[in-house]
Every structure is written in structure tokens, then in C-alpha cells.
Image (tube, rainbow, N blue to C red):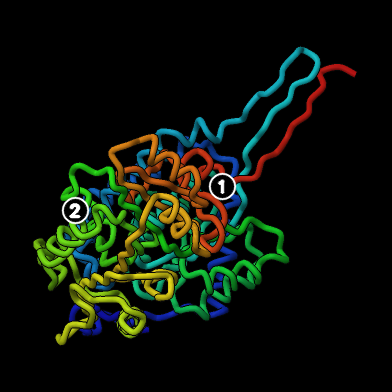
Amino acid sequence: MKVVNPATERVIKNIKIDDHLSIELKYQLAVQAQQKIVRTDIAKRLETVAHFEALLLKQETRLANLLTSEMGKPINQAIGEIRGARSRIAYFLENSERVLAEEVVLDDGHFREVIAHEPLGVIANISAWNYPYLIGVNVFVPALIAGNAVLYKPSEYTTLTGLEFQKLWAQSGLEPGLFQTVTGRGEVGKILLELPLDGYYFTGSPVTGKFIYEQVAKKMVPCQMELGGKDPMYITANNHNLRQVANSAVEGVYYNNGQSCCAVERIYVHQDVYHDFINLFVKEVKQMKMGDPINEEVFIGPLARKEQMAYLQAQVDDAVANGGKVLSGGKAETRKGYYFQPTVIINASHDMKIMTEESFGPIIGIQMVKDDQEAIELMKDSTYGLAASVFSDDQAQALKIMDQMKTGTVYWNCSDRISPRLPWSGRKQSGIGVTLSETGIRAFTLPKAYHMRSKI
């Protein structure tokens, strides 16, 4: 399998992919390793995770450059991702022992009732390419802390980073076999579905997520899906600093080239501020620097996947055909690499794919609304339910709107933000299950209830 630099289209490395035999061997090693450590003290596992976090700090520059080379993330954003991953690990280190401890819920001298949190066993972590560090540590760090073994399949677009994870865990002193990288494309992921694993954790497209969910349903094991989003943003009439709102919106749309499940993918603007917002927004977009992602001044690099350029172009063409007007961008760059211009389309409506289907790229549709109620109805008009944001000087107004969103996350005066202290989850076609927060730590365990009577 060839690993290609999306900025230059040059082959970085050829990778040997796994097959049935190699994956079965890795599974058997994982089973043996998990059985060996399952009864060990959690303090030892936390110590290993702390070593892993220290290595991320020590090797930050090298790891960031590798990530930039294989998926095109601008270097400053790659560094920011690694640092964000370290902050999430710090949360897990600080809270996991308490969250996973046995809970005595009754002890009256006659009956003692206890809840224990046992590891699942061996899990599959089928991960995504857009944030391999952040998405990865959400799953494999709490999974390992809880006493599980992990078969980690990185996306084919970030295989080199996935292989680095395995090296870093080995350097951290992790029990051999507990974390193993499985390399390849979709057909390799299908092999993992055939194994008698104890849990499946997937991040990616709704189409693939549904397939995995259906395939493993008969196993009756935990199966978490973090899927897509079509996250709306609403700009109310109550915004005194519209320039700052526009700045925030630009970052929410275009950070990581829009290749984020929680990126802002559609914007609704109250008619009273629509034109002013558009002018400020477009001005900010045209100031963004596109180019070689290794350049520290670059904000927009190449797309990670070549095929996405045709998909984005089709969305732009569909919007124009249905009355949309392109104010910026609208096409691929004529240069080496998978570059698509940051695109702004106004006069948008739900007759356009850009407002209803996930884009996952540096394009945005902006629609005028007459009042809050129209905005609410349009924001809710989606098969996705990941996140939604409201910008307003009036907190009560914002909360009234946020309370009506059928999404796992809502934002007031911010967007595209994830905290390790809060659960990250989707509704509807955005997935099922939770990562992060105390709930996300326990997502890699099964509860066991102990009923103990002291005397008969």
C-alpha cells in the first residue's frame, strides 16, 4: 500500500498490509497479553500511559512533521493536535482510577452491594485520518487504562502515524501484544469484524459505520459509532461584535481544511445582520493563506484524499445550479497536490446538497433567515445530530435555541470545540455511544453487580 503526500503527490513509503493470518496472530497475542494484565494494579497501567504522554512531548516535532506529510494538516495544526491529545491524556490520568474504582452503594451490616467495572477484553479501534491523535487517544488510552487489549486500525491515510503509536507504546513499557496496529484499507477492517472481539469502536463515515454496526450486531458486544455531521451555526440579530463572530465562524468552518466531523458545515444568519456578516466573513476567508502545509504561515493545506476534490466540486456546481452565488473560491487549485480553494456560497437553501449533505472540506453555504424560529427549523432539518452553535449576546435567547437542538453537543458563542471533561456523542446518523468524560472512561468496561449478605 502506497502512502502518498497529498501536498506533492509523491509516494512517501510503501507499507506491507495485514492479511487474515497476520491479524489472527495479532489477535491471539492480544488475548494472551490481556489475560496477563487484567488483574494488575491500575496504577501500573497509569504509569505506562504517563510514559506515553511524555514521549508525545519529547517527539512532538518529528511526529507532527510525519502527520503533515501523510495527510496534509498544516504543521501548526498538527502540533496543536498532539498537544490537545496530551491534554486529554492528562484528564484520563487524573480521573480514571477514581471513575473505575469499585463503588459501595449499600453497606448496612447485613447486605453489602458493590458495583465493579470490568474490562471488556480485546477491542477493535477502527480509527479516522482527520485527527488520528485526538480520535485515537479518545479510545485506546481509556481502553488500555481499563485493562483491555487494542487492535488499532488506522485509516490508510494516516498509517505511518498509526505505526508510530505502536512504537511509542512499546517504548512506554506497555505489555507486548496489548496494543497492535493493523494496517490496510477497508478489506482489512472487514477481517476485524470476523474476529470474536469484545467490542468495536469506529470513527468515520455513516455508510461504513452502518455496515460495521450491522455486521457485529449478532455478537451482542459493545459497538460505538462516531460518524458524520452537518453541524449548523446560527448568527442571531443580537451580536454587537460581528467582526469577532465572523472570525470565529471562519475558524469553525475552515480549521483542518473543514475535515472535521464537528466543523461548521452550514450557517444561518438573521436578515438584520446578514449582509454585514457576509462582508466580514468573506474578507476573513480571503486573508487565509493556502500552500505547503509545512509552512508555519499556512492555514489551508491540501485535502487528505484526492477523490474528495470531485465531491466538493459537485456540491459547488449543485449549489450554483440551484441559485447559489460563489463569493470566494469554488474550484480546485491548478497545482500539484489536492488543493481546493476555500469556498463561500451565499443565497443558500435546503434545495442544495451543500446545506444537507456532509461536505468535509473547505466549503460553506450561508442562508438568510427571517427570525429565530425559522433558524431553529432549518437547523433541525438534518439526518445528523452531532453539534450545533448559536452566536448571540443574549444568553437566554441562545439557551432557548440550544435546548431545542437534537444534537449531542451545543455551543454558545463558540464552535468546533471538544473538552475531555464533557461527553462527546452523536444522535441520529451521527452515531451512537460516548467518548470522553467519566462516561467515556467507563465505555470500555462492563458493570458487575455484587450482592453480598454477611449472615444467613
Rendered residue at 43%/56% (across/down): 374
Rendered residue at 44%/80% (across/down): 17
- From where the camera sits, is residue 211 visible? yes
Q: Quadrant of the C terminus?
A: top right
Q: Nearer the viewer, residue 388 or 437?
A: 388
- How many angstroms separate mark 1 from mark 2 (CA)? 36 Å
Rendered residue at 51%/58% (across/down): 150
> What x and y, as percent, mark residue 337?
20, 82
Residue type at the position of mark 2: Asn
Residue type at the position of mark 1: Ala
Q: Nearer the viewer, residue 176 or 71?
A: 71
Location of residue 276 (image quadrant): bottom left
- From where the camera sits, is residue 164 visible? no
Residue identifier under label 2? 247
Q: Examine the rendered structure and indicate whether residue 182 appears above or below residue 400.
A: below
> What x and y, as percent, mark residue 258?
30, 65
Residue identifier under label 1? 443
Rendered residue at 51%/69% (across/down): 206
Location of residue 354 (image quadrant): bottom left
Secondary structure under the numbered disc 2 in the rendered image: helix
